[in-house]
Image: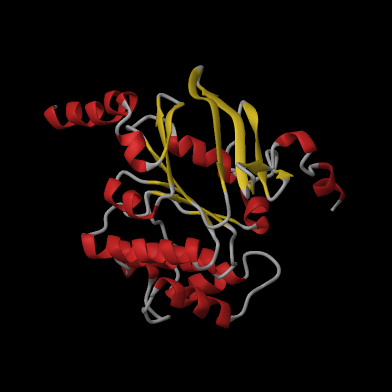
Amino acid sequence: MVELMLRRLSPSSGVEQGGTATLFSCSGISLDLGGREILREINLHVQAGEVLGIIGPNGAGKTSLFEILSGRMPPKSGTVWFKGENVTSLPLHSRSRLGIGRTFQTPVVPDELTVGETFKAARQAYRPFLTKFDAEYGADLVGLKISEDTPAMQLDTFNRRKLLLACLLMRRPSLLLLDEPAAGLINSEVDEIDKLLRMLAKEMDVAILIVEHRIELLGMIADRILVMDAGEVISEGLMDDVMADPKVHAAYFEDFSEEADA
């Protein structure tokens, strides 16, 4: 408790954006790996119930940014704030306990466990331990209708993503960091993800940061878009505005055009 009080947000840290309290933010985030600059002075903020989409070409630094925001990797410089606390020095598990959930590009599940055993492991990952009713709550939220006896390794990509999301949601997180949640899904499954994320943000007031290459999904759910290229933010705003930005066309669309021609 004393440690948290020492990290209490200072009056000059900018807890409000446009007159509305900010749930989560970072400022001046920079990262070097192997002598190469990966991120440079990244700033972002998100409010409760808001969806911030993050796009950019491959190698833009999006996943590296999530590594820092989730606590898996420390930044070279910069600060991360959550609910008025400076959480920059907190590791992944500590941020999870505060209410930050994160998914990854590849939905890796414990192959040696069944669906029920996976839920049990998640329920008992840290105190307070949760009950089976909490697991049922998470499964109902994401529409996971799989027998508890089913080996997790037998699940298809969509149900793996649902299982992992259910394990996060049964803890009632305030913030979700979602790294390409639509990867590997067909259109009908993307539509289901769309409805789920809308519900979480607009009905349950969960803040969502989502990295996604499927622009059609972000166009449906994102309140704002942040565009990254070469470790920097090059544009931010409404979807139509950033899509009309010449810097975005040069960095994002031309990059994919070159890949398609290769």
In this picture the colour scheme is secondary structure
Q: Is residue 214 visible?
A: no
Q: Which residue is drawn at 56% across and 26% down?
A: 30
Residue 259 placed where, x, y %? 19, 30
Q: Is residue 47 visible?
A: yes
Residue closer to the observer: 123 or 140: 140
Q: Residue at x 62, y 65 (%)?
A: 125
User: Left or right of 230: which side holds 257?
Assistant: left
Q: Residue at x 80, y 48 (%)?
A: 4
Quarter of the image where the C terminus is located: top left
Residue 11 placed where, x, y %? 79, 38
Residue furthest left in the image:
261
- Does 238 appear above or below 251? below
Residue closer to the observer: 236 or 70: 236
- Does 63 appear above or below 131? above
Residue furthest right in the image:
2
Residue furthest top in the image:
35
Residue closer to the observer: 4 or 16: 16
User: Left or right of 10: which side holds 63?
Assistant: left
- Does 228 appear above or below 163? above
- Does 71 appear above or below 115? above
Q: Residue at x 40, y 24 (%)?
A: 230
Quarter-of-image position of residue 159: bottom left
Count of labels in the image: 0
Residue 2 placed where, x, y %? 87, 49
Residue 75 placed where, x, y %? 60, 31
